[in-house]
Amino acid sequence: MDLPVEAWYRVIPVRTSRRSFEARLPKEETLARLEKTCREFRPFPEARTELVRDPGAGVFTGFIGSYGRITGAPCYLAFIGDMRSARVQECAGYTGEGLILEATSLGLGTCWVGGFFGRDAVSAQVRLDKFEKVLAVSPVGYALSKPSFTDRTFKLLAASSSRKPLSELIADAVVADPGIQKGFEAARAAPSARNRQPWRFRLEDGSVIIGTDKDEKDPKISRRLDCGIAMLHFELGARAAGLAGIWELLPPPDVARFRLKIA
């Protein structure tokens, strides 16, 4: 499917992690549209998303890592990767964030959960090929009209409203192209585990390179997955400003190159 730049870019400023939901199931047409996007948004062969309409028991039980308790979610998204690929984490982040933004555009609440969730329960509910693994999940549903005490508490603990200045995220002090600047601003708003914002950008010969701030040391939540999320945000911002390009995935320590298309 073509990247729905306008719809997804528009909801970047309003997307926020929500952990407390109304018990009611979203409308059938809303879920059908989300399932359609799961099927059709497959920019990389090694990553995909499934919507599970009934979480059942054990998916969101107790505290989920540092992000708090998930309550009331009537369904969830499972972000699945083929572990034979060395680039699976960034592909899953990019693909999964597309579904997060689609859900947001439909008026639904979401929350990336990558560290601690009921993996056995999720694996029993989604179809997995031999080499596939569920890398992360997100509850999906109508968030409570007012953030719950848990939402407010863990937003404070995670400092999720704070963002690093662009000067810490970009190697080049001056960015002359307004499209690239808009891409950087959209990437700055991307979610990440513990709000660590591990992506670092640099400009190089008509391209924008994204890499991580340090070597991978957390086996539960990959920095490269976070970078995949930021890749989509950057592309949406750049394309919204009329700047075309295509991603090329790179070996470590870099993650990917956005090669600009000159009109």
Image (spheres, grey):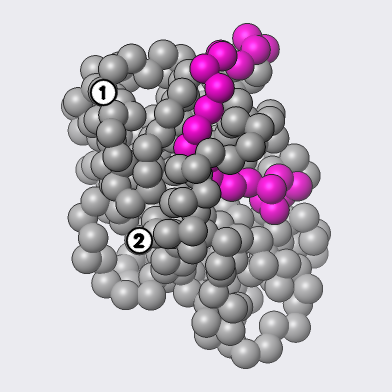
Residue 13 part of the magenta-drawn span: yes
Residue 68 vertical position relative to residue 37 in the rendered view, above or below: below
Picture residue at 42% right of the left edge, 59% below the top? 157
Q: Amino acid at mark 1?
A: Gly
Picture residue at 46% right of the left edge, 66% below the top? 197
Q: Residues within 10 Å of mark 2 (few under 14, many from 20)?
A: many
Q: Magenta region's main secondary structure?
A: loop
Q: Circle 2 is placed at which residue position?
A: 223
Query: In the shown orientation, is residue 240 left or right of residue 125?
Result: right
- The reply to whether residue 101 is visible in this rendering is yes
Residue 55 part of the magenta-drawn span: no
Query: In the shown orientation, is residue 5 left or right of residue 219?
Result: right
Q: Circle 1 is placed at which residue position?
A: 58
Residue 34 vertical position relative to residue 153 in the rendered view, above or below: above
The residue most toward the front is 149
Rendering quarter of residue 253: bottom left
Q: Amino acid at mark 2?
A: Arg
Measuring from the top left, give residue 22's x and y in whole percent: 56, 22
Q: Secondary structure at mark 1?
A: loop
Rendering quarter of residue 24: top right
Magenta-tinted stretch: 9-29
Q: Marks 2/1: CA distance?
A: 26 Å
